[in-house]
Amino acid sequence: MAFPVVRVAELERFVGSPVTIQGWLLHHRSSGRIDFLVIRDGSGEVQVVVRGEALELLNSETWRGAGQESALAVTGLVRRDSRSPLGVELEATQIRLIQAARDYPISPKEHGVDFLLDHRHLWIRSPRQAAVLRLRAAVMRAIRDFLDRNGFVEADPPILTPAAAEGTTTLFDVDYFGEHAYLSQSGQLYMEALAMALGRVYAFGPTFRAEKSKTRRHLTEFWMVEPEIAFCDFEQNLGWQEELIAAVVAEVRERCRRELTILGRDLAALERVRTPFPRISYDEALARLKAAGMELAWGEDLGAPHEAALALQFDRPVFLHRFPAAIKAFYMQPDPARPEVVLAADLLAPEGYGEIAGGSERIHDYELLEQRMREHQLDPAAYGWYLDLRRWGSVPHSGFGIGIERLVAWIGGLEHVRETIPFPRMLNRARP
Ligand code: 4AD
Ligand code: MG
C-alpha cells in the first residue's frame, strides 16, 4: 500500500496517519532496542523512532557506516510529541536507504569559518544556514509584496553596462568583444529611465563592486532592491523607505518565527521597528559624534565605527541625511536651501549594523547634472542617454537602494553578511 509522501513541515496535519517522508539523516542515536533518527528534508526536522521490525535495516550490512547526510525515505505513523519543536514525531514502520553517506566533512563539532566557506556547498544544509536562506527568501518576497501592492512595476536594468553608476574605483571590468564593459554597481540610472516610462519601478538583482574591503558588511557581489519613483521629492522618498522596511520586518516576524528562533534573534528588538524612523542631519551627526568623543571635521565621510556609534543611540533604524555634496554621488540633488549639502540619506540599522539603504532625490535639471558630471571627472558624452532624460519631460524624482544581505543580516541578527547569501563572493573568495 502506498502512503502519502509529505514534507516534514506538513506532518502535523497527518497526526494518526501513516505517511512517507524523504530526506537526509542529521543525527542517529542508538540504544539497543530503540534507535532515534533525526531527518531533515529542507522544510524542517523530525525525530523518527525506530524499533522492532523497522530496526532491521539499521542493523543490516547495507546500513553499516551510513552516517550523517545519508539519504532516506521513511514510512511511519505520525504521533503527537509535545517535547518536539514540531509537535510531532514519526514511529517508523519501514526505512529505505537511498544513498549511504560516509564521513561527512561537517560534523556538529566546531569548524573554522574558512573550512565552512570552503564547504559552503554542504554547509548550506545545516539547520542554521538553511534557516538563514529561508529568511532571505521571505525578506525578498515581503519586499516584492509591498512594492507590488503599491503599484510598482518590477523592471530589470542591464548587468553589463558601459559606464559607472557609483564611482569609478569599484568597477569590475569585462572584455566586451574588444570594448570595455562593467558589471553593474547599481541599476539606478536605468531605473530613472524606467520611472519616466512606468512611474513607479523597482529593480531586484545582483550588483557588483570591486571593493577591497574586508569587513563583515562587504561582498563583491550582492543583491539590491532599487525602487525609483517619478514625481517624488526627498521627504516622500524617506516615507517610502520607512514604510517598506517596517512592512518587511512585520511580515517576516510573522512568517519566520521558526527561523528567527533557530537564529536566536531577539524578537523584542524587531518589534520596535515602527514608523516614523528618526532623522538626523549630517551636521547633527557630527555634533553627536563629537559628544561621544569621535570628532570629525565638516566634509569628512563617516566610517563604520561612526555609523555604529550613531545607530546605537536609537532603538529603530535612523536616517542620516544632507551630506556634503563632495562626498556623495554626482546625480544627487543639492538642497535648494543649502547647496553645499545634497538631498540624500543613508538608513542605518540599529544594533550596530550600520547602513542598510542609501537613497536620494536626483538632479532633474540638465545643466546642473552636466556640471556635476564634470566636477566628478565623468565624461558627459558617456552618459548621453541619461542626460536625455533631462531633456524630455524631466520631473523631480527619487529612489533608493537596499542591500539585501545587510537587511537580512540585521533582521536575522547575524554576525556577517557572508551567511546571508548562498554562495558569497568576497575580496579573497570566489569559490565554490
Ligand atoms: O549606498 P549605495 O552605494 O547606493 C546606490 O548604489 C544607489 N545607486 C542606490 C539607489 O539609490 N538606487 O548602495 C545601496 C546599498 C547600501 O546601503 C548597502 O546596503 C548595499 O547597497 N551595499 C552593499 N552590500 C554588501 N556589500 C557591499 N559591498 C555593498 N555596497 C553597498
Ligand atoms: Mg551608500
Image (spheres, rainbow, N blue to C red):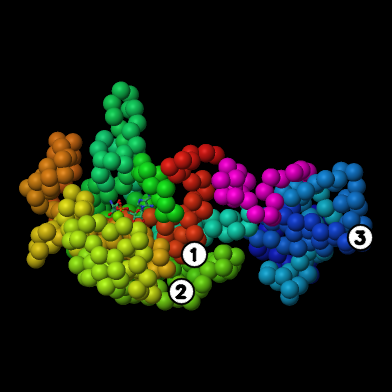
Q: Position of residue 205 (x, y in %)?
A: 39, 48
Return the residue found at the far front. 293
Q: Is residue 379 left or right of residue 83?
A: left
- The tag earlier along the polypeptide, 2 or 1, is 2
Q: Pick whichever, 178 or 54, lies toward us.
A: 178
Mark 2 touches mark 1? (CB < 8 Å): yes
Q: Residues within 10 Å of mark 2 (few under 14, many from 20)?
A: some
User: Which residue is depicted at the point 30% across and 71% down?
Assistant: 292
SS class of the residue under badge 2? helix
Amino acid type of disc 2?
Ala
Amino acid type of disc 1?
Gly
Q: Position of residue 39 (x, y in %)?
A: 73, 57
What residue is shown with label 1?
A: 413
Q: Is residue 238 left or right of residue 32?
A: left
Q: Is residue 270 above or below residue 148?
A: below
Amino acid type of disc 3?
Gly
Q: Is residue 304 above or below residue 106?
A: below
Q: Magenta region: which residues?
A: 98-124
User: Which residue is depicted at the point 26% across and 35% down?
Assistant: 162
Choose top left, top right, bottom left or bottom right for residue 305: bottom left
What residue is shown with label 3?
A: 32
Choose top left, top right, bottom left or bottom right for residue 53: bottom right
